[in-house]
Amino acid sequence: MASKLPTVAIIGQANVGKSSLFNRLVRSQQAVVAREAGTTRDNVLGRVEHKHHQFWLVDTAGLKDPNDEFEASIQEQITEAAEAADVILVMVDSSQYVSDQDRTVAKKALRSKKPVLLIANKSDLKDSLPSDEFKRLGIKEIIRTSAEHNQGVTDVLDMIVELIPAKSEEIPDDILRVSLIGRPNVGKSFLFNTLAGKQQAIVANIAGTTRDVNRVSVRYGARDIEILDTAGMRKPGKQEVGIEKFSVLRTLQAIEESDVCFLLMDVNELNTQLDQRLAGIIDEAGKGMVIVISKWDSVQDKDAYTRDALAPKISNTFKFTPWAPLIFTSSVTGQNVTKLFDLALDIDARRKQELKTRQLNDLLQKLIQRHPPAGLKNTHPKLRYIVQTDVSPPWFVIYGSNLKYIHWSYKRYLERHVREAFNFAGTPIRFSFRDEKQIKANKERIAQGKEPVTKKYKADKEASKTFDKPV
């Protein structure tokens, strides 16, 4: 998908303001920004639109000396981003004299033979140097900016759209967004790269390598799937102040943005409280979920018995989300990796299914006959009818009287049987209970002008039309 639009890459040494400019251009807090050199480690991608032009913007890690293998892999990504770009933005700190690193960056960019713009950032500072100081880098076009204070950003956009063709691309509504969620170092980035089929995120044996949410779009069958790789979440007490707190927020944002979440756990370190907490967050957000046991290749003497012995223990830990399927994978051998795509598509289809009201009410009456709801003396709850009001996640509203006396165990009974009857594996489902006496009182208050008409009231009115005659 990304190849259809022009690509613009921002390169430069660490801490010159690349991520701040990226966020200004994309108009969202997508890259982690902090006053700490080397915050961005992976290439972060965002879509920008300006004057009927659309393009992909890539924020790269800051250029440093490749003094170790990990740092070298970051530098490699910068080079690849520059080579793949149609326009390169070289960014420098205008309050600092030109350094050897700035010269290296400029040479890399000019060697590519692509259009290059020099962004002299932090030009609002008192000790900002004149533009002539930066002409020695050999880049003709110099734009002075202050990304932090939104100065010169429109000039950058105007110059970019002069250099790229006028292309735009409609974002398909049916993109399936899948995020990889889990603690640090459980194999999210390795799985991300395996699913993407290319080296997109840095993989290293260092906990906390990924800080930003990395994205890649793939085509699987007839469907576009966007995969989001997130930074690992640690226990609250172990989170470093600053950067890591931002990364946790990115993880929560990724969950909100996703349709289905793969909750990854290292087979060698299962069932931690944090995994349960993450599962709870995904459940509360109403997202589809698959519990993915990673690094299955690292288990010695594995056989069906080992898996059969582990599965009930894991399921017992996540008994509050019994609907989430469990799968054992290995990114090294590729075991069950493709199956994850099929699982995500199946779950997405179940989340979107709309049930006929008659089917739901036939089931409700059978469940009531088999096991009537208990209540207090002379105040037994009566369930009259059920309607589906929403999808993704599926949401059902049950109308009746004395519903406040329904025990939580009876609600669970209803949910379990609705799940089994209509196969909602992999997704949470929601139930609301609406008392007709309360609805009637609300109608009277609205008629008297004492209360405004709400969406809830409109939904109740619409549902009651279907059921003038009780089921």
Image (tube, grey):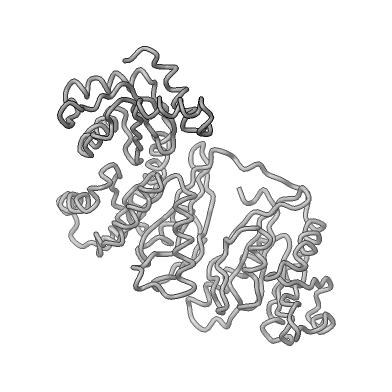
In the rendered image of this protein, does residue 260 appear above or below residue 154?
Answer: above
Nearest the eye: 320 or 16? 320
In the rendered image of this protein, does residue 204 appear above or below residue 220?
Answer: below
Nearest the eye: 224 or 150? 150
Direction from residue 311 to residue 208 in the image, left or right: right
Residue 190, percent across and down?
41, 61
Residue 312, percent across and down?
17, 49
Q: Can see residue 107? A: no
Going 37% across and 31% down the picture, which residue do you hit? Answer: 396
Q: How many marks?
A: 0
Nearest the eye: 40 or 331? 40
Q: Give the residue furthest to the top.
A: 469
In which quadrant is the C terminus drawn? top left
Nearest the eye: 227 or 251? 251
Residue 373, percent across and down?
19, 28
Going 79% across and 84% down the picture, which residue do you hit? Answer: 129
In the rendered image of this protein, does residue 239 appear above or below residue 414?
Answer: below
Going 31% across and 32% down the picture, which residue do you hit? Answer: 423
Q: Can see residue 259? A: yes
Direction from residue 415 to residue 136 in the image, left or right: right
In the rendered image of this protein, does residue 331 appear above or below residue 1?
Answer: below
Going 76% across and 83% down the picture, which residue do you hit? Answer: 128
Q: Quadrant of residue 66?
A: bottom right
Residue 369, percent across and down?
18, 20
